[in-house]
Amino acid sequence: MIPNYPSALLEEAVHEFSRLPGIGKKTALRLVLHLLRQPEEQASAFGNAVIRLRKEVKHCIHCHNISDSDVCPVCSDFRRDHLLICVVENVREVMAVEGTAQYQGVYHVLGGLISPMDGVGPSDLEIESLVERVRTEKPEEVLLALSATMEGDTTAFYLFRKLAGLPVKITTIARGIAVGDELEYADEITLGRSIVNRIEFKS
Amino acid sequence: MIPNYPSALLEEAVHEFSRLPGIGKKTALRLVLHLLRQPEEQASAFGNAVIRLRKEVKHCIHCHNISDSDVCPVCSDFRRDHLLICVVENVREVMAVEGTAQYQGVYHVLGGLISPMDGVGPSDLEIESLVERVRTEKPEEVLLALSATMEGDTTAFYLFRKLAGLPVKITTIARGIAVGDELEYADEITLGRSIVNRIEFKS
């Protein structure tokens, strides 16, 4: 139990921090007291970064990724393959795919996954805009890079049906044993899929 | 590794969050993306709470605890025993002692503990002001409620010597087996102290 705060300002700041996911009252107090020990400019920089981000950030008009301008750096890069669209859940997945340095196409950020449990339906996501993009931009391939969860699979299946009539190749990232994983600890479903989808060995 | 951010605003906010203790880049990104999904007012409330706190918060002129006004609620409460001063490290310890509802005196917040390893010496703490307070306010008792660590013990010993010549009783909170702890798992030093400082059994 955390008892009365000696200061309403302190309580307010702790309250705001403790609304963040995974941050309890005790952690919030620790973080706020840390900020209180910093120079005033640093606390201002922290607060203003949050305010500015929420106020000024945009979404790319093509791929809907977070961006400082109307068109994001990836979409405005002509060296990238604009006929290959990778469909991802969110900006974090864009950054994860970019981090591999294995992908040269562009993106389409859905803004979430279909999840009836959380009340997220297809109309809450950037699905219509994807269909429209495939229709007008006529890409060669749409690569679905979604999580291997029920929500990811549901979304992939929905997208597959939505895009089925259009002249585009639809692919999905490989499921299998993660690099570095020991076989005996892999779950049966993953191991089963990795056998069904086995690939030719190249030396 | 977290690769390039698609937005400088996003990167800035993540950078600010990741300067907080115990918050890495990945957690920072998760928290920032959460704030981005909230209504603009909530992101503003969050940022402004931090800025206002750092700018407007005061320290009580008597006990040096964090306060909204020049004199904190505890020091301005005449029902409390102003002849009993509890010396603590920081506001968190004030809140912890208040949470017990077992203490009716006032406080003196040192603002830290003597720690040569971290470069914190006696002059960095509110020690002179404590000596001055004992001299002028003439309390009956000074209760040292410091952590049972090397820093806490060093600070307690230093305070004891500083206050030794003054007509005040100096006490320290009891060290012993924590309520709910099993004896066999207690460390020997704690168990030893709890035997040396044994108290008369009252039914």
Image (cartoon, coloured by chain):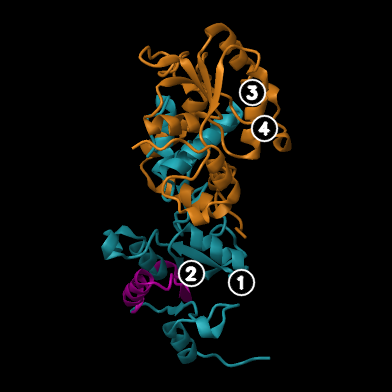
Chain colours: A cyan, B orange
Q: Are marks 3 and 2 in contact (CB under 8 Å)?
A: no
Disc 2, SS: strand
Residue bearing mark 3:
B159
Find residue B52 and report its horizontal and vertical position in percent.
47, 26
Residue range in magenta is A136-164
Q: Quadrant of residue A121?
A: bottom left
Disc 3, SS: helix
Q: Is residue A126 visible?
A: yes
Badges 4 and 3, same chain = yes
Decide which of A39, A11 is in the foreground and name it.
A11
Q: Are marks 4 and 1 in contact (CB under 8 Å)?
A: no
Residue bearing mark 2:
A85
Between disc 2 and disc 4, the foreground one is 4
Q: Amino acid at mark 1?
A: Gln
Q: What distance separates the C-alpha of mark 3 from that of mark 2?
A: 68 Å
Between disc 1 and disc 3, the foreground one is 3
Residue bearing mark 4:
B154
Badges 4 and 1, same chain = no
Find residue B172 and report its horizontal and vertical position in percent.
54, 29
Residue bearing mark 1:
A102
Find residue B164 and report its horizontal and vertical position in percent.
65, 17
Find residue B113 and report its horizontal and vertical position in percent.
63, 31
Q: Residue at x 56, y 30 (%)?
A: B89
Image height of A161 relative to B176, above or below:
below
Does A143 lie within the magenta span?
yes
